[in-house]
Amino acid sequence: MIFKKEKIERQITLKKDTRDGILSYCKMNHPNEGMLILKGKSKKGNVTIDGLVVPPFSESGPTFAGFPHSFLPFDLSYVGTVHSHPSGSAKPSVTDLHNFFGLVSLIVKSPYEDDDIFAWDSNGDPIKLTIS
Ligand SMILES: [Zn+2]
């Protein structure tokens, strides 16, 4: 007999205000990448994002935006990061996956409109994203 292991369907909920904040930040940094830390709550695989933090010591450039994780203060409300892809692709790069932080990585592709935000897990698989 085969028992199906129940798969936890993860879901990301992004507050509308936070979404708008991300989009303006990405537009502001264009053509460079912009990166922000996502604040929120996680409950049984469901993550609600309701705040943004500008990372300390962030480096911005046309190809990669990152920060040394060791500089990040330990904070349980940090659920992940968001960064922009000025190139127009929303797929996480190898570097993105290598630098994965937290539970979710949001990627915003150019031109940073409402439908240009995508959520990914640490394997590079897409996660359902809902705007509320
Ligand atoms: Zn990237």
Image (cartoon, rainbow, N blue to C red):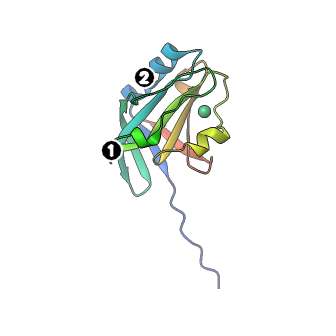
Residue 62 vertical placement versus 9 (above, below)? above
Residue 130 has which mark?
A: none
**Disc count in the image?**
2
Q: SS at mark 1? A: loop
Give the side of residue 55 with respect to residue 83, left or right: left
Give the mark nearer the N terminus: 1 vs 2. Answer: 2
Residue drawn at x 40%, y 39% is 71
At x 58%, y 21%, the residue is: 61
- Name the residue carrying label 2: 20
Find disc 1 in the rendering and name its residue.
Answer: 77
Query: Is the residue 97 above or below the residue 34 in the image?
Result: below
Quadrant, the C terminus: top left
Is residue 132 visible in the rendered image? The answer is no
Badge 2 crowding class, 10 Å Cα cut-off, few under 14, some 14 to 19, many 20 or more, is: some
Front one among 93 and 12: 93
Ligand 1 found in image quarter: top right
- Tell me where residue 109 appears, x and y as whole percent: 60, 26
Whole-percent x and y of residue 127?
Answer: 55, 46
Q: Residue at point 34% right, 41% down?
A: 73
For badge 1, the amino acid type reads Ser
